[in-house]
Image: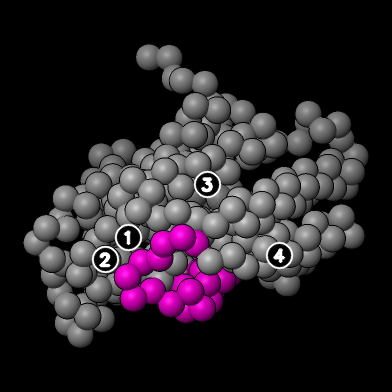
Amino acid sequence: MRLPHPIILVCLAVLCGCTLDATMKGVTLGGTGVITATAWRYILASFIMVGLFLAMRRPMPGWKAIRFHTLRSIAQVTSSVTFFYALTQITLAEAVVMGFTAALMIAPIARVLLGERMSPVTVGASLVGFVGAAIAISGEPTSMPEGGTRVYGISAMLVSAVGYALNIVLLRMRTKEEDAITLVTFMNVLPVLFLLPFLPFAGALPETNTWPLLGAASLAAVGIWSFMTLAYARARAQTLAPFEYTGLIWSSLFGYAFFQEIPNVRLYGGAAIIIVACLVVAFETHFTARREARAAAAEIAP
């Protein structure tokens, strides 16, 4: 079976991501608490991933790897819970745009944890990107989630972006040692273990009418990594990166169609600045690696 073009695959991955966001927003606005919704999103996805892990007979990682993934999952759970909470406070498009800033936080976090150097271009582009974020949130949207507080939502999104960036940097330390199936299995199973103790206090079961949405969210979560893995295995990151920002289109459409959200025009102006800044950082990082390796750009793996 011939796979679609990598650009189509990455666009499908982004669509899955926006579907996950929209369905989780529907679950939380439907009366299910954020902790409960997040826990069950991971529980259902864990059933899928554990089944794949066993079916493909992947070897169980050692205790050192398990300890590492356990610590990394703290950042992941923090990012997920704060993101899904933010969806109850601000519009879907605002949350996705603020999530773009995570790409700007990866370089400084990698500088601290991995000792990776930051070029002046990267520093400058990152600062410009955060200016774009300030512009994006400066305008009030035409509609807001009922009872939402923008300050809480934006603050939660910034925490989520830091947690996501930290999670990505930590994953870099394992991608050469473990395959995607193993990584994603741990990315779903370990958050369940962190969230289970909170369920008796947050509400053990979601609202009855939200189970189909949670099922869709879990399938979408698995779809994200599946399409991304296939896409980035066949094309360079610099080719595919711009298409990840199609998430703004999907989030705007889903927000309007399902939640009657109409973002302010400033959001799109700020988003454009953030996207350009993220692309500059991505390309600069790529060419810095080329210079340090003294190799042609085409010889550096994505």
Q: What is the magenta range?
A: 141-165
| Image quadrant in which you'd find residue 103 | bottom right
Splitting the image into 4 quarters, where does residue 219 fall?
Answer: top left
Residue 263 visible, this orientation: yes
CA–CA distance between discs 1 and 2?
6 Å
Dot placed on the residue nearer the N-terminal end, 3 or 2: 2
Using the numbered discs, state the Cα–Cα distance from disc 3 to disc 2 in whole angstroms: 21 Å
Residue assigned mark 3: 248
Do callouts 1 and 2 mark residues in contact (Cβ within 8 Å)?
yes
Can you see residue 229?
Answer: no
**Disc 2 residue type?**
Leu
State the image coordinates of residue 215 (x, y, percent, origin top left).
21, 50
Query: Magenta stretch: residue 278 in it?
Result: no
Q: Is residue 289 left or right of residue 80?
A: right
Task: Identify residue type, mark 1.
Answer: Lys
In the picture, which quadrant includes the C terminus? top right
Residue at the disc numbered 4: 130
In screen coordinates, is 267 left or right of 252?
A: right
Above or below residue 227? Residue 148 is below
Pointer 2 residue:
29
In front here: 1 or 21? 21
Left or right? Give the position of 91 relative to 299: left
Depth check, front residue: 26 or 293:
26
Disc 3 marks which amino acid? Leu
